[in-house]
């Protein structure tokens, strides 16, 4: 695009975001037509979350509905919260109760959890999401601005300047985003809200209970006094006429509808909560012998968050403030000074590490005399935990190492698995300022993520026959595959009190290990390939395990326990590397998907006593020979003795019914709302078929390549079958699994070194 086109697009964006200020009457007409525009804080936050919709995810082996708002969709997932769906759903349930006034409106939401679990990302996600929602027509947020210059003496104007100016510079916005309906007298407002809620197609009514903020009240009172002196009869119309009051929309952001108190913020409790007096302005704006609220800074966290959201980040650093927040949720009121109070409509959220709970429980042994008991009663705690899904941890680790922000939303486990296992290339600048590409080989991110997840799982809550890797895979995809059998997570019983995700290796530790490896020199060489620029899964796993003892974040007991958990992870990752190499070696011998699909279609027609459509569009009976050839030659499950000609015996019939038809029926049940077609079934969803599609063993290699010798793999003699097979295998690994030539070389060497021990 040209420079002018970019300017035009920016103009269009702002034009869509902002409306012209409107008279109060026009605003009332708008909310009568669209009552959601008048939503109070908790309802507005709830509306923003629900408007984004939901999607289905699998976490801890169970399907859950997740609100897309927490994927940060308006910002391409930049601050998406990965995992913790139950915690986020619980947060939304709390908001729903608070917004509806169902018993929790006095609660302060408390989000607690270890470091690097997504709590700070939630804050950023809320800010991003609310900002973008407020730019949409359905999410417009409004407040008021005042102009008293036209009412009389300029000396009493709202300006802080010595010489007030006219026109647009005479308009002053409410510094705390006061709700426009707060202008109305209480009894009139109640009638208006009743009509709004009658028109509102929602289970949560709109509530506007606060009065005008002190800044706006000063303007209102001044105007009312001026017009009363003049004998004006319709005082409210005069005070709120378009020359004095306008309703304007604003973009929600930190400082305007969102207040965030950071750990490093200082000041007295009042300054941090509502702001401070500007002493120089008190002399300019003295109001009838008392402090003028227009001389207040309104830069405290509650002032900034009025109208929507207040977040206290790292709340343990502001524990002294928490008791002063006790009455804010239920009374909705704070004081600027003696006799000057301010009504607050904000959703309070405090965020902390586990250290806050220790501070709150310091007097717990005093039971009824605990001075913090009232505060703890008002806190509604939701606990964030470390991720226990391999795919989520792999996604998070990639985010930590790159600028990737897109949220993974796979259509199948196969697609998700490919993302977990795929390589990663990172550009690194060395001491000579040269930039080079460093490759994390396939399965490297997976290995690091799996080790982190394994460290977080409760080792005492694993059913017999499983290990930590099995549990991690169950949590991620909801089932385990053992040969022909698929075992679903519902078939296992996990302890209800398991502490999965409460501790373990944080992603920041893993990220730092990988980041350091990117700059370390590796003692491996190849005459033609840059193998020194490849980081292998075992490189990361070894380094993570070795650093546990010296990392201050882990206790000696944790370090020893986590170090032991690396072994099953190494075994699992090696098995996957071995599978890659085997598939690449035997690529030419694999059964093509079309042959498999043909077999499935014939079996389904055979079982249901139906016909199939051939290439000429004719409907014919299923071919018994096609099924027999597949079962004997490709599956290897049966011999000629199992057939009378082409007619199957009982064992074959039972196999078709139990292994093929049952799997098809399972898929048909899952898709029961749609028309079921066999062609829609992924062959890999049928366990016995998945086996034949993707697996060979080393005995197959021996039979196929009689002169192959894995002990020669590192440097095979030219002209040998081993040399030819290696060249083909390395190409296949690049083509099939996205290895580079260097990582394919290293991975195949590693696998063949282990295979050679058992070759004879």
Image (spheres, rainbow, N blue to C red):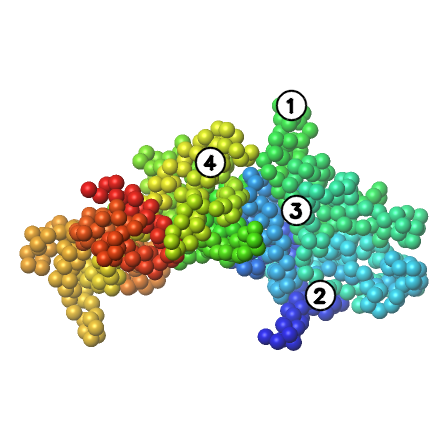
CB contact under 8 Å: marks 2 and 4: no
Q: Which residue is mark 4?
A: 546
Q: Which mark is residue 311?
A: 3
Q: Of the two numbered discs 1 and 2 on the same chain, state the one appearing first in sequence.
A: 2
Q: Residues within 10 Å of mark 2 (few under 14, many from 20)?
A: many
Of the two numbered discs 4 and 3 on the same chain, state the one appearing first in sequence.
Answer: 3
What residue does disc 1 label?
A: 366
Image quadrant containing the N terminus: bottom right
The answer to which of marks 2 and 3 sits earlier in the sequence is: 2
Question: Residue 437's mark?
Answer: none
Q: CA distance from mark 1 to mark 3?
A: 30 Å
- Picture coordinates of residue 372, whole percent (x, y): 67, 31
- SS type, badge 3: strand
Looking at marks 1 and 3 on the same chain, the residue that comes earlier in the sequence is marked by 3
Place of residue 263 in the rendered image (x, y in percent of width and height, measured from the top left): 68, 42
Q: Which residue is mark 2?
A: 27
> Are the residues at dot 4 and dot 1 in contact (C-beta closer than 8 Å)?
no
């Amino acid at each position: 695009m040209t420079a002018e086109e970019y300017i035009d697009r920016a103009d269009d964006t702002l034009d869509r975001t902002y409306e012209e200020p409107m008279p109060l009457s026009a605003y009332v007409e708008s909310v009568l037509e669209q009552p959601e525009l008048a939503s109070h804080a908790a309802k507005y936050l709830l509306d923003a979350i629900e408007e984004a919709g939901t999607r289905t995810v699998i976490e801890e082996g169970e399907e859950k509905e997740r609100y897309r708002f927490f994927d940060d969709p308006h910002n391409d997932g930049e601050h998406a919260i990965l995992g913790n769906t139950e915690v986020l759903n619980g947060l939304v349930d709390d908001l729903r109760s608070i917004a509806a006034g169902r018993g929790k409106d006095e609660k302060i939401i408390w989000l607690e959890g270890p470091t690097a679990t997504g709590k700070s990302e939630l804050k950023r996600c809320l800010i991003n999401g609310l900002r973008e929602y407020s730019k949409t027509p359905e999410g417009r947020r409004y407040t008021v601005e005042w102009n008293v210059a036209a009412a009389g003496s300029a000396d009493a104007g709202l300006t802080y300047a010595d010489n007030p100016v006219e026109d647009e510079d005479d308009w002053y916005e409410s510094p705390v985003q006061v709700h426009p309906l707060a202008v109305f007298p209480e009894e009139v407002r109640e009638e208006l809200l009743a009509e709004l809620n009658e028109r509102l197609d929602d289970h949560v009514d709109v509530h506007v209970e606060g009065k005008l903020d002190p800044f706006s009240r000063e303007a209102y009172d001044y105007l009312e006094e001026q017009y009363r002196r003049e004998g004006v009869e319709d005082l409210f119309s005069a005070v709120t006429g378009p020359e004095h009051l306008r309703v304007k929309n604003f973009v929600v952001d930190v400082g305007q509808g969102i207040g965030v108190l950071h750990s490093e913020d200082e000041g007295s409790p009042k300054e941090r909560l509502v702001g401070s007096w500007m002493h120089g302005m008190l002399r300019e704006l003295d109001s009838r012998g008392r402090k003028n609220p227009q001389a207040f800074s309104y830069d405290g966290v509650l002032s900034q968050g009025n109208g929507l959201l207040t977040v206290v980040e790292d709340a343990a650093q502001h524990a002294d403030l928490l008791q002063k927040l006790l009455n804010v949720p239920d009374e909705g009121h704070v004081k600027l000074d003696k006799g000057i109070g301010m009504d607050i409509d904000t959703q309070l959220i405090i965020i902390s590490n586990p250290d806050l709970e220790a501070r709150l429980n310091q007097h717990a042994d005093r039971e009824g005399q605990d001075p913090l008991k009232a505060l703890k009663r008002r806190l509604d705690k939701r606990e964030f935990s470390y991720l226990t899904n391999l795919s989520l941890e792999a996604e998070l680790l990639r985010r930590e190492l790159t600028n990737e922000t897109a949220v993974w939303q796979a259509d199948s486990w196969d697609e998700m698995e490919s993302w977990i296992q795929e390589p990663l290339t990172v550009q690194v600048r060395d001491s000579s300022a040269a930039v080079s590409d460093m490759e994390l080989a396939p399965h490297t991110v997976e290995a690091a993520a799996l080790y982190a997840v394994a460290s977080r799982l409760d080792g005492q809550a694993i059913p017999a026959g499983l290990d930590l890797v099995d549990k991690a895979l169950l949590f991620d995809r909801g089932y385990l595959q053992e040969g022909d059998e698929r075992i679903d997570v519902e078939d296992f019983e996990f302890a209800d009190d398991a502490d999965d995700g409460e501790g373990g290796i944080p992603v920041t530790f893993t990220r730092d290990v990988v980041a350091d490896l990117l700059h370390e020199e590796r003692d491996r060489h190849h005459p033609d390939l840059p193998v020194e620029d490849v980081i292998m899964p075992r490189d990361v796993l070894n380094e993570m395990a070795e650093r546990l003892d010296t990392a201050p974040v882990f206790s000696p007991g944790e370090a020893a326990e986590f170090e032991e958990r690396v072994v099953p992870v190494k075994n699992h990752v090696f098995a996957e590397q071995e599978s890659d190499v085997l598939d690449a070696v035997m690529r030419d011998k694999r059964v093509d998907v079309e042959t498999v699909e043909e077999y499935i279609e014939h079996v389904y027609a055979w079982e249901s006593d139906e016909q199939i459509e051939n290439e000429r569009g004719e409907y014919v009976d299923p071919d018994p020979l096609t099924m027999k050839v597949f079962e004997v030659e490709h599956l290897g499950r049966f011999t000629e003795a199992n057939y009378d000609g082409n007619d199957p015996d009982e064992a074959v019939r039972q196999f078709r019914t139990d292994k093929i038809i049952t799997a098809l029926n399972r898929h048909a049940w899952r898709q029961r709302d749609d028309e079921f077609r066999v062609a829609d079934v992924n062959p890999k969803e049928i366990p016995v078929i998945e086996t034949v599609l993707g697996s060979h063993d080393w005995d197959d290699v021996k039979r196929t390549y009689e002169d192959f010798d894995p002990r020669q793999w590192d440097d095979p003699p030219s002209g040998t079958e081993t040399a030819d097979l290696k060249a083909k295998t390395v190409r296949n690994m690049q083509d099939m699994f996205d290895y580079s030539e260097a990582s394919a070389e290293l991975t195949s060497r590693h696998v063949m070194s282990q295979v050679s021990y058992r070759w004879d």
